[in-house]
Amino acid sequence: MILLPSSIVKPANVGLSLSYGLSLNGALFWAIYTSCFVENRMVSVERIKQFTNIPSEAEWVKKDSPPPSNWPSKGNVELKDLQVRYRSNTPLVIKGITLSIRGGEKIGVVGRTGGGKSTLIQVLFRLVEPSGGSITIDGINISTLGLHDLRSRFGIIPQEPILFEGTVRSNIDPIGQHSDEEIWRSLERCQLNDVVASKPGKLDSAVVDNGDNWSVGQRQLLCLGRVMLKHSRLLFMDEATASVDSQTDAVIQKIIREEFAECTIISIAHRIPTVMDCDRVLVIDAGYAKEFEKPSRLMERDSLFGALVQEYANRSTGL
């Protein structure tokens, strides 16, 4: 417009258009910024709409069929043709497992990634409902129980220690069912008594979100103390020592052997040495229970467990 003759475009119009052009740049920026902001916030609306359509879990408490107050008293677990899939249109993850675990046994669960090890724990807690078959614990089919009645009777030590923002007391006894004396006794058994006693607030010492003001080993020991307070006859472990050092690993294993000697323990192992001292080893491969026997007997013959041990030994030697 500057190069055109003034008879075609007046200089006043050129200045006016440039002035409007500069303001249009700012208006365009704010229009794009606002549209992006609204689009990002609409994701939250989309998620809320999605969550409103998620099917609810089973009943939290079933008043007509509560389990006995001391259930499970022995810790016997029976799986009959157990089949599990995550959604109705997906293939089976567990394809028919039948086995019997006697009360007080220590069972190690091993297998390749994706074989169905963690799914077995999820279905025992009914995070995923069985597609077929049944799970019976001390003579009671767990599908007939309310979710609270079921889950509150089990103990679990996860692979990643979970702590919530609050205090030591609220983390080790979330429901507030136990006295200070019982909590201190539990802390003493899991070797955290001195650590908590040295803090100014003691049981009311702060725990930040995810327990970031505690070491990983201390967090795992707190989770262990939480399980001790429940006095569960059935304990599940998902490689509880995978994220701690060898010394803390030895401490945790020693506590578990001493404090849970009479409990049924089902331990998912990602490292082979963890299950070598178990009573029996369950080898899950592609959703099937391929082997279920004592580790020593499986090592004596050509077995999947023996192959996993040999592979672990070769990899450790290579490192």
Image (cartoon, rainbow, N blue to C red):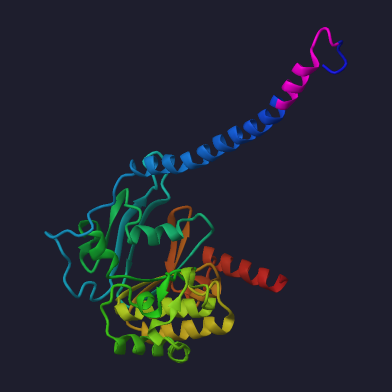
Q: Nearer the viewer, residue 175 or 206?
A: 206
- 170 over 8 or under it: above or below: below
Looking at the image, which is closer to me, 114 or 198? 198
* Residue 118 seen in the current view: yes
Q: Is residue 158 above or below residue 41?
A: below
Q: Which residue is drawn at the image coordinates 31% and 60% (left, top)?
A: 79
Q: Nearer the viewer, residue 59 or 300?
A: 59
Can you tell which quarter of the image residue 136 is in?
Answer: bottom left
**Would you say 17 lies left or right of 87 here?**
right
The answer to whether any part of residue 98 appears in the image is no
Going by the picture, which residue comes out furthest to the top?
Answer: 7
In the rendered image, the quadrant that contains the C terminus is: bottom right
Q: Which residues are magenta?
A: 6-19
Q: Is residue 33 left or right of residue 160?
A: right
Q: Is 300 in the magenta?
A: no
Instruction: Name the chief secondary structure element in magenta.
Output: helix
Task: From this view, report whether residue 137 is shown above or below residue 34.
Answer: below
Looking at the picture, does residue 285 appear above or below residue 316?
A: above
Quadrant location of the N terminus?
top right
Residue 263 in percent (x, y) is at 33, 78
